């Protein structure tokens, strides 16, 4: 646990630095273009390379030292941040530079993330998977409180240059913490590791492993559809809030902080209560809770309702995410987790990429014009969502939120998914029986 906490602290600081930079980039892009598509493309270019590299990354993580892979991932991200800093300082930074930078960071981020997540099962006994996984959500949501607040305040004081410098320092801290600890490596056997000449089989190993296990396949499909619905709404969240508030970055920062507080409360609940006995209940009920909170957010037009809705929605994510992580960690042998988790990563990245690709143009060219005072959808939806800038995005946000609610509810209709924990044995079940 001590080793994990040290690594977790380093990654938390890094996440805060990256969160500040991401928030600042969102404001910078919106000020430059005032287009939802431009912001959506920022997310798209960060994720598309990850889709391509993730299968290879899983192969790499199962073969090579996971500690060194984490160090390489953070180091490359720091170098890219330095390059962006130099371009901006010399007034040469353009939008395509930013897209290229996040694409490069995305490639090494997926390697670093897989190395980090697969290290959990080599450091901790499985009864602590939910709690340890929830600490990772604590880092994310702690960043959601600190990063936007600091970035919102510092953006007008030290600008993008100062925020990038903070981000670079955070990467240095993350690398330093990992350098000072020992991360156990899973044993490699000829059964789960083929020769380098069979690298194509290695890349497709995760797909085959999941495909022949219907309950894991159901979990994969669930992850795909929920990620698509969630990221569809997420891609228009910031521009919607900015449009409805007259570009008020403080409101956007406050909402991010509310999400962070909600997430931290969720983490505390998991660590105090321990979560649902049936972890699949945590997954499905968490999805339902997220959907309900975001439905209220999409219908509202004021921060007075947005803030509690954001809090309640985010409270469910640590419950949802830690329960889902615990199922995968418990059912998949640590020796092959890199390749299997890479498959899960690819599927969720594809869902996210498609969502970002579709949401921006739909908002800019169809729903926003249709919700202007003389728009075609105003007679039907204007009384609910209002008219003018941001109203079309609010309609799309509501649709995606309703999708999340329905996905969580429908999960209980399929036994293969509903009873995943009893249908599929734990990866160490045979070992336990022999003992």
Image: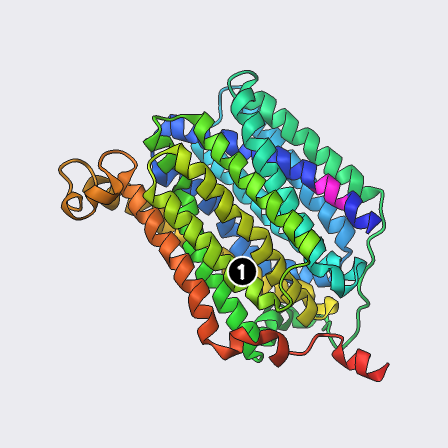
Give above or below for 77 relative to 329: above
| Left or right relative to 348: residue 169 | right
| Left or right relative to 325: residue 382 | left
Q: Main secondary structure of the magenta part?
A: helix
| Left or right relative to 346: residue 77 | right
Residue at position x 40%, y 41% from top?
237
Q: Is residue 8 magenta?
A: yes
Q: Which residues are magenta?
A: 7-11
Residue 311's spot in the image, x, y percent? Answer: 50, 42
In depth, the one of 7 and 278 nearer the eye is 278
Quick one: SS at disc 1? helix
Whether residue 356 is visible to the viewer of this picture, yes or no, is: no
In depth, the one of 431 and 319 nearer the eye is 319
| Quarter of the image with the C terminus in it | bottom right
Give above or below for 300 relative to 292: above
Give above or below for 387 relative to 323: above
Residue at position x 42%, y 64% from top?
407
Residue at position x 63%, y 31% from top?
167
Residue 328's spot in the image, x, y percent? Answer: 64, 66
């Amino acid at each position: 646990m001590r080793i994990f906490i040290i690594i977790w602290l380093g990654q938390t600081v890094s996440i805060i630095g990256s969160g500040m930079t991401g928030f600042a980039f969102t404001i910078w892009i919106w000020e430059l273009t005032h287009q939802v598509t431009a912001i959506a493309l920022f997310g798209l270019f960060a994720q598309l390379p990850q889709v391509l590299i993730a299968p290879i990354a899983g192969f790499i993580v199962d073969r090579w030292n996971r500690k060194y892979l984490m160090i390489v991932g953070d180091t490359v991200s720091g170098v890219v941040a330095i390059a962006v800093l130099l371009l901006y300082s010399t007034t040469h930074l353009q939008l395509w530079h930013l897209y290229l930078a996040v694409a490069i960071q995305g490639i090494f981020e997926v390697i670093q993330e897989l190395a980090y997540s697969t290290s959990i099962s080599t450091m901790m006994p499985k009864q602590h998977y939910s709690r340890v996984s929830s600490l990772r959500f604590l880092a994310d949501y702690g960043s959601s409180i600190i990063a936007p607040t600091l970035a919102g305040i510092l953006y007008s004081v030290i600008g993008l240059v100062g925020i990038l410098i903070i981000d670079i320092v955070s990467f240095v801290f993350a690398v330093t913490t990992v350098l000072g600890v020992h991360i156990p490596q899973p044993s490699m056997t000829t059964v789960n590791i083929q020769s380098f000449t069979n690298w194509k089989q290695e890349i497709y190993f995760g797909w085959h492993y999941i495909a022949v296990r219907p309950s894991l396949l159901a979990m994969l499909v669930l992850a795909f559809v929920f990620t698509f619905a969630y990221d569809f709404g997420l891609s228009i969240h910031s521009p919607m809030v900015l449009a409805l508030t007259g570009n008020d970055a403080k409101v956007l920062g406050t909402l991010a902080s509310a999400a962070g507080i909600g997430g931290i409360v969720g983490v505390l609940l998991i660590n105090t209560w321990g979560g649902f006995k049936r972890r699949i209940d945590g997954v499905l009920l968490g999805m339902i809770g997220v959907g309900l909170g975001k439905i209220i957010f999409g219908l509202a037009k004021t921060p007075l309702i947005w803030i509690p809705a954001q809090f309640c929605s985010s409270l469910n994510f640590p419950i949802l995410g830690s329960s889902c992580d615990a199922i995968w960690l418990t059912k998949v042998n640590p020796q092959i987790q890199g390749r299997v988790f890479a498959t899960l990563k690819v599927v969720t990245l594809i869902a996210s990429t498609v969502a970002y690709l579709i949401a921006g143009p739909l908002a800019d060219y169809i729903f926003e014009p249709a919700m202007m005072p003389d728009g075609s959808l105003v007679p039907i939806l204007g009384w609910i969502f209002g008219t003018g800038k941001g109203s079309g995005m609010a309609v799309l946000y509501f649709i995606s939120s309703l999708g999340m609610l329905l996905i969580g509810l429908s999960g209980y209709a399929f036994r293969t998914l509903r009873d995943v924990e009893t249908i599929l044995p734990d990866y160490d079940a045979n070992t336990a029986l022999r003992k």
